[in-house]
Amino acid sequence: MANKDASGTMDMPDSAFDGMVRIARMTLHDAALNQIRDMIIEGKLAPGMRINEGQVGAMLGVSRTPLREAIKSLVGEGLVEILPAKGAVVRRFSIEDIRDILEVIKALEQSAARLACERASDAEIATIAALHEEMLALYRSRNRLAYFKLNQAIHSALVRASGNPVLSETHEQLQARIKRIRFIGNETPDRWAGAVEDHEAMIEALRRRDAPALVEAVGVHLDRTLDRVRDTVV
């Protein structure tokens, strides 16, 4: 039954929401956000390129409202910036920008590695190890985009295993900014194979709860990430 407040206004009864689902616009927003993010990661929307709302909206089959919401989310992630007289533009990072971001990510992930070895449950470690095995299967099938997304999920899961939500939130914000950069780090077979070897060392150390070894493996991996992308940044 609906209730009235002191002013006589009637609240909606809980039964009014029976059978309701989220409005379609939110679904369109999420779909547009994921699609545009993937286009940036894969380089279909290159650094410095203006995002033409009409063109992208027509290609994705969405109206301007969910598209603008998606662009706003990407601005928040640091993948897109709004420039005067140009509008939404795919953000361009210099090698100095990338170095600075990776230095902070390295510090965060190494701190998380120490804490995870102390705090993570056996179930959390088993879950991360299972994600790693799934990632290896994607590597063997050369499904590069799916591999990359799972790779990033493993980094996030490791940080969450620290049990420190502030650390995790900060890490997610920075990691989102350089998704394209980290993706192109695996463009050549040897670089991709090297990244996989790095992850093997990280997972082995995590399974043993060997904090010094995991901290070292994480640091080596992120230092090599900078080396892998140095020649490909434009």
Image (tube, rainbow, N blue to C red):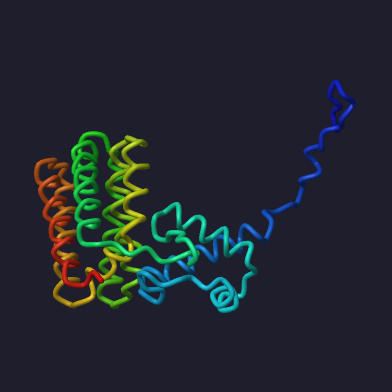
Find residue 55 and report its horizontal and vertical position in percent.
55, 78
Image-based side of 190 in relation to 98, left or right = left
| For residue 48, above or below residue 19 | below
Image-based side of 191 in relation to 35, left or right = left
Name the quadrant of the N terminus.
top right
The image quarter containing residue 43 is: bottom left
| For residue 113, above or below residue 66 | above
Find residue 113 and report its horizontal and vertical position in percent.
20, 42
Q: In this view of the protein, which residue sits in the foreground, 26 or 114? A: 26
What residue is drawn where x is 61% and y is 61%? 27
Q: In this view of the protein, which residue sits in the foreground, 132 or 90? A: 90
| For residue 188, above or below residue 6 | below
What residue is drawn where x is 61% and y is 64%? 28
The image quarter containing residue 130 is: bottom left
Name the quadrant of the C terminus.
bottom left
Q: In this view of the protein, which residue sits in the foreground, 185 or 12? A: 185
**So how many labels did they put on this image?**
0
Image-based side of 17 in relation to 157, left or right = right
What residue is drawn where x is 82% and y is 37%? 13
- Looking at this rendering, what residue extends furthest in the right direction? 8
Find residue 129 and report its horizontal and vertical position in percent.
26, 54
- Looking at this rendering, what residue extends furthest in the front direction? 85
Find residue 156 and report its horizontal and vertical position in percent.
32, 50
The image quarter containing residue 229 is: bottom left
What residue is drawn where x is 23% and y is 69%? 233
Q: In this view of the protein, which residue sits in the foreground, 85 or 31? A: 85
